[in-house]
Image (cartoon, rainbow, N blue to C red):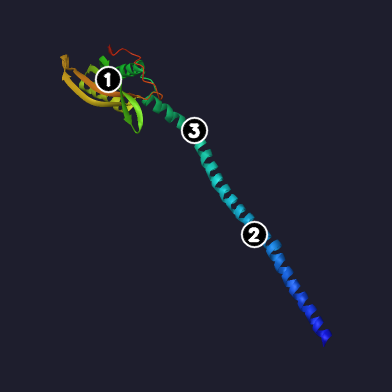
Amino acid sequence: MGTRSVNRLWVLGGVLGAVALLAVSWFFLIRPQYDRADGLRNETATAQTRTIVLQRRLSELRQQNGNLPQYRAQLEANRKALPAESDLPDFLRDVQSAGDRTGVSVKVLTVGAATQVTAGGAKVYSLPVSVTATGTVDNVGRFLAQFQERQPRAVLIENTGLTTSSAGAVDLTLSLQIFVAPPAGTTPSPAAPASSAASS
């Protein structure tokens, strides 16, 4: 009977030792490996998600890069509409060309002093311009349409005046604003006399 008890104790001790060894192995060896594997799986899933997002963004950038010529043309048109310099000689030539195309004689172009204004959160300069032109009613109408539709420089027509001239002609007087967006910290240079007479 004593030997059986001792054997049972040894068997019970061996079982308890094996359970304790298994528990220690689980908590200190096996479970950390599982946790590490779970962490690596999560990192892999996150990296895959980021890869998908980056691939989508790269595809968008490639598509935008394909539209680069269109963006450059649009930028050039915007620069002509809102230049960094006053470019009054170019503006005067554009007005003269509009007169030539429509059969109108541009007599006087007067430019006032620049004033700073804020538009869309940006600081730009406004130059008041007065234009006097003579022609038939139809031609003067086409000349006015040039400012509204085909003029490369953005202009804001504030007032128009129409008076009858000799031999069925009319005199058109335009009061308008042109705008300049110089680089930060600079002001637009006059680049032209304040008043100039011109005839087509």
Q: Three-letter amino acid code at disc 1?
A: Val
Residue 153: % across, % down = 34, 24
Residue located 25% across and 19% down the image: 130
From the viewer's perspective, is residue 3 above or below residue 170? Answer: below
In the rendered image, the quadrant that contains the N terminus is bottom right
- Residue highlighted by disc 1: 129
Q: Earlier in the sequence, mark 1 or mark 3?
A: 3
First along the sequence among labels 2 and 3:
2
- Circle on res. 35: 2
Q: Quadrant of the C terminus?
A: top left
Q: Nearer the viewer, mark 2 or mark 3?
A: 2
Q: Write down the residue under mark 3.
A: 68
Instruction: State the residue in front, 94 or 188.
Output: 188
Whether residue 46 sits left or right of residue 105 in the image: it is: right
Q: Which residue type carries mark 2?
A: Asp
Q: Which mark is residue 106?
A: none
Q: Secondary structure at mark 3?
A: helix
Q: Quick one: SS at disc 1?
A: strand
Residue 98: x and y, percent?
A: 31, 20
